[in-house]
């Protein structure tokens, strides 16, 4: 980090609110207690640094930490808030898309994680189309992690050559 003013400033403000929430009995500040708030604070600090100092390589980790923190805070505060693995894949997809706007790479990974989030969201809900696909490919579906392993090995080998 060349210029740490945005990162430090946002981090100090966030940590101040975090510790103030622990000492005060204000319901709004109680919302900021717990480790999910720390994730969101660190993510917001990284995003502030990324955009203020034009250090765009901090967009992905900043968006990821901020998104995970906010998702966990909202899931704890509101019982009807959607949560689960599908939401985390959705946040990862959004992180790749936000990063790809500035770094011109990663949109393909964003599309992959978005597709994965959509499949996980709707596959267990009894949707007829996903039920048909799931029953038709049930024997192959058991081995989809092997496809990820093969893809990972290919990426490692292709990168080394």
Image (spheres, rainbow, N blue to C red):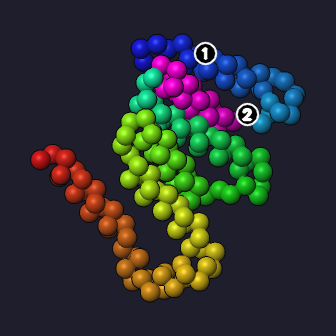
Q: Is residue 44 above or below residue 90?
A: above
Q: Where does label 1 land, which residue?
A: 9
Q: Determine crowd level at label 2: few under 14, some 14-19, many 20+ residues with C-alpha closer than 10 A.
A: some
- Residue 48 visible? The answer is yes
Q: Nearer the viewer, residue 49 or 52?
A: 52
Residue 145, given in percent of the width and then of the height, sits at: 37, 66
Q: Is residue 74 left or right of residue 121?
A: right
At x 24% / y 53%, what residue is drawn? Answer: 155
Closest to the camera, between mark 2 and mark 1, is: 1
Q: Is residue 75 above or below residue 46?
A: below
Residue 117, given in percent of the width and then of the height, sits at: 53, 61
Magenta span contains residue 35: yes
- Residue 35 visible? The answer is no
Q: Is residue 11 above or below residue 87?
A: above
Q: Which residues are magenta?
A: 34-53
In which quadrant will I find the N terminus?
A: top left
Label 1, secondary structure: give it: helix
At x 59% / y 37%, what residue is drawn? Answer: 66
Label 2, secondary structure: give it: loop
Name the chief secondary structure element in magenta: helix
* Separation (CA) of disc 2 from disc 1: 20 Å
Q: Quadrant of residue 82?
A: bottom right
């Amino acid at each position: 980090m060349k210029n740490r003013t945005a990162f430090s400033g946002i981090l100090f403000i966030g940590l101040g609110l975090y510790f103030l929430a622990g000492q005060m009995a204000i319901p709004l500040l109680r919302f900021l207690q717990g480790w999910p708030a720390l994730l969101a604070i660190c993510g917001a600090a990284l995003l502030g640094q990324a955009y203020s100092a034009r250090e765009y390589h901090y967009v992905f980790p900043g968006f990821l930490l901020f998104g995970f923190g906010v998702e966990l805070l909202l899931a704890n505060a509101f019982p009807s808030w959607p949560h689960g693995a599908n939401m985390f894949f959705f946040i990862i997809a959004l992180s790749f898309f936000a990063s790809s706007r500035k770094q011109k790479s990663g949109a393909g990974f964003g599309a992959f994680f978005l597709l994965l989030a959509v499949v996980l969201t709707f596959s267990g809900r009894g949707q007829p189309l996903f039920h048909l696909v799931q029953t038709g490919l049930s024997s192959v579906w058991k081995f989809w992690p092997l496809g990820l392993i093969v893809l990972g090995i290919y990426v490692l080998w292709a990168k080394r050559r």
